[in-house]
């Protein structure tokens, strides 16, 4: 990190203001080259930017001497007018001073490597930048504030305490220690194993807040899946015709329900077909539905019969049956459908999707379901797949240590040590270079 980096910190395009950031040992020289002596720390100063004899812009300049900066290094910001020519001129001037254009996420990576953030907080920065909903913002802000770090650090402390007891029994067998010193590690390990197990059950919640709650619309051709998608999206996202097989690929539409990101997918009608293209659409529909958090089985009230095995095979416990076109059948038929579907263990929603506000009951029910599924009293213990993977690894070592306590204390101590390392990888206390590359490569340039 001996080189000094620069990058635009705002998006490209016409804007009132653009921000160019600089960080590294030559940051002060860069400010001096363009704007004269650095201003007072953390106070904006209006300066004329120039490079040599060429005037660049009138801008606000901020100076952040390390370590009291975002990256922990000497850093500066130029708040210039947002025209493309202005930004490019400032970037070219910085490059000519020997500075290097930053890689994606390099500013935050330097903050991590200089101890300003741990790895979960750095991921919180990326999630906050990408946040599209209020729930995503809240979760990312909590993670940036250290909610995950505090939980993992508390768990790590429990492991360290257990390890101290086990190593005392191993290293000082002849000292006047309590005979059950190793066994005293068991209650703490059992409690921690239970906490991690509960966290793993809840692990998908954090990821679904980040990535979106996935809902698949499945059913026979012409049941009204595309009509329902358009009604929920409040726009014509899918083509609706009376021709069976119109939808042949997955049509994904992002929605915000109850403040949470939701991804709704219209899929090809499930049926046997000789058409190669439609058959591929059916295969993709099944694959998307299998990975969804909820499947809505859309049924034509007038055409439904119970032996629709192609459709039943994609459903899971807790899925819904959406009975569409109820305006085309009588009350006797509706009651018959309710009984049949209730016997399948499905929640039943009734609607006439083509009618004005015909899908409002479905929207309200989905909103309540998504909020219930994704909200929680506690901050989720995992918001990314790598967190869950490390938690699984730590739990496995703890379980192995519990089986060894009282029999092979040396092996139990080693397993607790490995569990500690697994937790430490989540926050980045120890982390291989390829994991860091994977985390920070997802950032935008300038952050």
Image: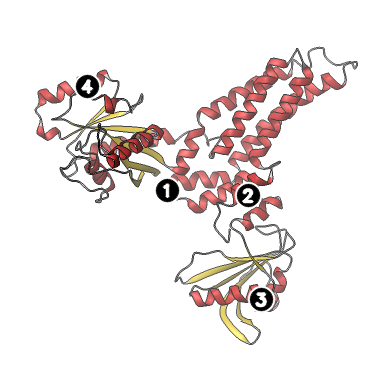
Q: Which residue is mark 3?
A: 96
Image position of 355 (left or right of 3) = left
- Mark 2 packing: few (<14 Cα in 10 Å), some, or many (20+)? few
- Mark 4 packing: few (<14 Cα in 10 Å), some, or many (20+)? few
Q: Which residue occupies 75% across, 62% down?
A: 2
Q: Name the spot of residue 368 as percent of width and height, x first.
A: 34, 35
What whole-number distance in Å separates the C-alpha atoms at marks 1 and 2?
27 Å
Circles 1 and 2: CB atoms closer than 8 Å: no
Q: Which residue occupies 40% across, 39% down?
A: 213
What whole-number distance in Å separates the C-alpha atoms at marks 3 and 1?
41 Å
Task: Check disc 2 and report its element: helix, strand or loop.
Answer: helix
What whole-number distance in Å separates the C-alpha atoms at marks 4 and 1?
41 Å
Question: Nearest the camera: 269 or 110?
Answer: 269
Circles 4 and 1: CB atoms closer than 8 Å: no
Q: Is residue 258 visible?
A: no
Q: Is residue 433 visible?
A: yes
Q: Name the spot of residue 284 as percent of width and height, x first.
A: 35, 38
Mark 2 or mark 4, earlier in chain? 4
Which image quadrant is residue 328 in? top left
Q: Name the spot of residue 36 as percent of width and height, x first.
A: 68, 79
Mark 1 or mark 2, earlier in chain? 1
Image position of 208 (left or right of 120) = left
On residue 307, the disc is 4
Which image quadrant is residue 150 in? top right
Q: State whether residue 38 is above or below residue 133.
A: below
Q: Which residue is mark 2?
A: 437
Q: Which residue is mark 1?
A: 133
């Amino acid at each position: 990190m001996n080189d000094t980096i620069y990058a635009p910190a705002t998006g490209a395009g016409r804007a009132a203001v653009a921000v160019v950031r600089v960080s590294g040992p030559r940051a002060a020289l860069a400010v001096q080259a363009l704007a004269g002596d650095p201003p007072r720390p953390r106070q904006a100063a209006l300066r004329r930017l120039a490079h040599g004899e060429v005037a660049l812009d009138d801008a606000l300049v901020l100076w952040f001497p390390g370590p009291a900066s975002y990256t922990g290094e000497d850093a500066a910001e130029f708040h210039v007018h947002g025209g493309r020519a202005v930004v490019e001129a400032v970037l070219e001037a910085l490059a000519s001073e020997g500075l290097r254009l930053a890689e994606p996420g390099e500013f935050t990576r330097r903050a991590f490597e200089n101890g300003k953030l741990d790895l979960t907080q750095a991921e919180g920065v990326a999630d906050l930048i990408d946040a599209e909903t209020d729930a995503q913002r809240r979760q990312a802000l909590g993670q940036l504030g250290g909610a995950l770090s505090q939980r993992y650090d508390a768990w790590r402390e429990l492991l360290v305490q257990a390890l101290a007891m086990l190593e005392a029994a191993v290293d000082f067998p002849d000292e006047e220690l309590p005979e059950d010193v190793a066994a005293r590690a068991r209650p703490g390990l059992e409690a921690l194993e239970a906490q991690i197990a509960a966290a793993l059950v809840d692990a998908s919640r954090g990821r679904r807040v980040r990535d979106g709650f996935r809902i698949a619309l499945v059913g026979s051709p012409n049941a009204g899946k595309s009509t329902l998608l358009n009604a929920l999206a409040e726009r014509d996202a899918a083509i609706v015709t009376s021709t069976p097989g119109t939808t042949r690929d997955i049509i994904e539409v992002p929605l915000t329900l109850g403040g949470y990101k939701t991804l709704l997918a219209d899929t090809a009608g499930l049926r046997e077909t000789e058409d190669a293209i439609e058959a591929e659409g059916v295969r993709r529909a099944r694959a998307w539905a299998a990975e969804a958090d909820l499947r809505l089985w859309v049924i034509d009230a007038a055409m439904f019969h119970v032996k629709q095995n192609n459709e039943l095979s994609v459903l899971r416990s807790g899925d819904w049956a959406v009975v569409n076109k109820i305006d085309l059948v009588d009350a006797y038929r509706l009651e018959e459908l309710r009984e049949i579907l209730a016997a399948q263990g499905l929640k039943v929603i009734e609607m006439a999707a083509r009618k004005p506000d015909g899908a409002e009951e479905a929207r309200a029910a989905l909103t309540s379901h998504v909020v219930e599924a994704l909200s929680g009293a506690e901050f989720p213990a995992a918001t990314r797949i790598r967190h869950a993977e490390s938690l699984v690894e730590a739990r496995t070592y703890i379980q192995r240590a519990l089986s060894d306590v009282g029999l092979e204390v040396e092996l139990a101590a080693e397993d607790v040590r490995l569990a500690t390392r697994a937790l430490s990888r989540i926050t980045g206390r120890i982390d291989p270079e390829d994991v860091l590359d994977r985390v920070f490569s997802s950032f935008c340039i300038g952050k």
